[in-house]
Image (cartoon, rainbow, N blue to C red):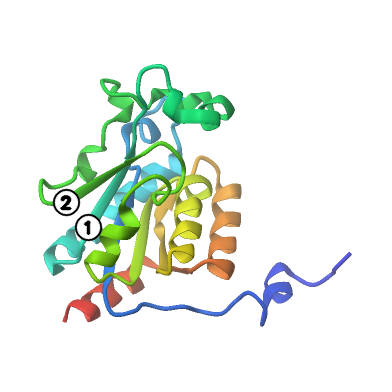
Amino acid sequence: MSTTSLTDNYKGVWDSRIGFGNKAALIVIDFMQGYTTEGSPLFAPGVVTALAESVELLAQARALGTPVMHTNIRYQPGFADGGIWVKKAPVMKAMVAGNPLAEFCPDMLPLSSELVFTKQYASSFFGTSLAATLVAQGVDTVVLIGCSTSGCIRATAVGAVQHGFRTIVVRECVGDRHPGPHESNLFDIDNKYGDVISKSEAMAKLAELAG
């Protein structure tokens, strides 16, 4: 069994950086009230913190003219479109029209000019036109915020790099229900699929690209 630290074990093998390209888009993933409402089965304290941190970043992106796109989860009555996932995770059945838990958090409401991609699975790319839309707008870098780190953030990060996008995850602006999976997935994303960076760094890079 290895006695080296986790960081040392990955050093020089999985720790390269990808950075920003020429045009970035901010992808706001599943900031829905089910994750921020105490008493909800999906409630995740880390998402409450991430939401508060994301308000400033979202406002800056809008002010700079950075493309902003949102995702949410919706199922049809009967949940046939949820396939095996809603069988594995029946808690997701809350994501139906008319359930307040499936509505966007008030601080993250999309503007009428911002696209919303509705999905049924974890990755924002699976079964949606997100990739085609980004390509059509000349975007080569996606900046991910939202929830949850171990679920839809990680799945979207993997999907993004597989579709050829530089993938950036903003550490303070993603959250989960427990710090264990949150930190382990940030470590994995940062080493294998994209760059995990601070909010201040993300804001500086977005301003640089816009200016």
Tag of residue 136: none
Q: Which quadrant would residue 93 be assigned to in this image?
A: top left
Front-most of residues 201 and 153: 153
Q: Position of residue 91 (x, y in %)?
A: 49, 25
Could you tell me if the residues under marks 1 and 2 are in contact, i.e. CB atoms within 8 Å? yes
Badge 1 is on which residue?
68
Q: Residue at x 30, y 49 (%)?
A: 52
Three-letter residue code for mark 1: Val
Front-most of residues 98 and 43: 98
Q: Residue at x 10, y 46 (%)?
A: 112
Q: Residues within 10 Å of mark 2 (few under 14, many from 20)?
A: few
In the displayed structure, does residue 103 sit left or right of residue 201?
left
Badge 2 is on which residue?
114
- Secondary structure, mark 2, is loop
Three-letter residue code for mark 2: Glu
Q: Position of residue 72 (x, y in %)?
A: 32, 40
- Secondary structure, mark 1, is strand
* Extreme residue toward the top, this view: 78
Quadrant where the image shows the N terminus: bottom right
Front-most of residues 184 and 49: 184
- Residue 132, compared with residue 201, is above or below; it is above
- Residue 198, compared with residue 37, is above or below; it is below
